[in-house]
Image (cartoon, coloured by chain):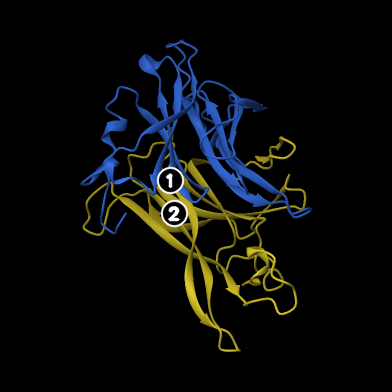
Amino acid sequence: MTLDPATKAVAEVATLPNKYKELTISTGDVDGCTQDAPAAPYSTTALQLWGIGWDTNNVYHMQFVFDTDGTGGTFNPRGRVSTGGNASGHVENSSRNRLTSCIAPEPVAETLPDKTAVTSLQQYARVWWWGDTDASGDNAHGRSMKYRMDFLRNLGILPRLPLRGPEDRVRVEHE
Amino acid sequence: MEDGQTWDWSNDYSDGRRPNAARFAVFKDKLFLYIAKTYDDNTGAILYQKQIDPIATEYVDGTRWNPPAVQIWEHRPNDADHPQVIRGLVVKVINDTLYILLQYSNTRDLYLITSTDGETFSGGATPMHIFADKDCLLNGDVVTRDRDGAALIASVTKDDAFGGDSTTGTCKL
């Protein structure tokens, strides 16, 4: 479902091709999962989905790319990938709120060709769920995975535009 | 929180109003926690907001914390046979507005609450949509509409609006 806050229009977009106990989504591209690479490596129209499969404890990963109107789109033809992460057997088919995800940037120090030191941003997605065991073999501990996502390179101060505000102070390149 | 540190928020489930969903959001340079709770004796639902970061030291005691809760919304139909807790909850920020999407259990209706300052909230939950099937909000994020660059809230649902025992595992985007 997508909601346009400006018009309050709601669109029911797609039914997932498989069944799940639980699902979570985060916007952005996962490294190596871009459909259009290298022409459009960064896309805020791409959505990553992780789910705990129905009648299984497997954690799966999928990708969906919205169409231009945001009311439809396509799942990545690679389908869904088992991440190797196992959920606790206590996560039932009837459960919810046992899996979540979030994307956050980490600063990366870089030096531009003109020797200017800048800070760029590497995006990472984290997925957490109620896991089966921890490293010690203890049951039902939280587990997580970390995905490298888009890299937002700081290209420094714009050479020609006058500085009017924060939005004009740097150029950012998505990688 | 530092690595290895845990905070105990037991006060939030020992006050007789049990949490059934929680979401984080960063808004206006502050980290907030949104907690949906059952109303007394399953008569309805309450939604609270707590400011987690920055947090005043007066609300931290060792590994326990209990920042004050701001009540955003309450819904009390008083039908304990068909309790309407907040089953679906998505909280997202687009530009200068906080959007709270919520759905009560045993209903198909989707509601929206907004805020532009994190202190005052739109006058009530506004009906946004009625799901055709028994879909219920699970999680969401903000995506960009390619045509014009507008920000949209995308959500996934599971067909458990009328209880976990009735779900078939069908999920929708």
Q: Is residue B40 above or below residue A105?
A: above
Q: Are marks 2 and 1 in contact (CB under 8 Å)?
A: yes
Query: Does B64 sit left or right of A114 as displayed?
Result: left
Query: Does A101 sit left or right of B170 as displayed?
Result: left
Q: Chain of mark 2?
A: A
* Circle 2: element type: strand
- Going 48% across and 53% down the picture, which residue do you hit? A102
Supply the letter of whichever chain is yellow.
A
- Going 38% across and 45% down the picture, which residue do you hit? B52
**Place of residue A150 in the rendered image (x, y in percent of width and height, measured from the top left):** 57, 67
**Place of residue A76 in the rendered image (x, y in percent of width and height, measured from the top left):** 64, 58
Q: Chain of mark 1?
A: A
**Place of residue B77 in the rendered image (x, y in percent of width and height, measured from the top left):** 50, 12
**Of callouts 2 and 1, which one flags the residue occurring earlier in the amino acid sequence?**
1
Q: Amino acid at mark 2?
A: Val
* Circle 1: element type: strand
Residue linked to disc 2: A127
Q: Tell me, what hue is chain B?
A: blue
Neighbour class for label 2 at 10 Å: few (<14), some, many (≥20)? many
Q: Amino acid at mark 1?
A: Leu
Which label belongs to residue A99? 1
**Place of residue A145 in the rendered image (x, y in percent of width and height, measured from the top left):** 41, 59
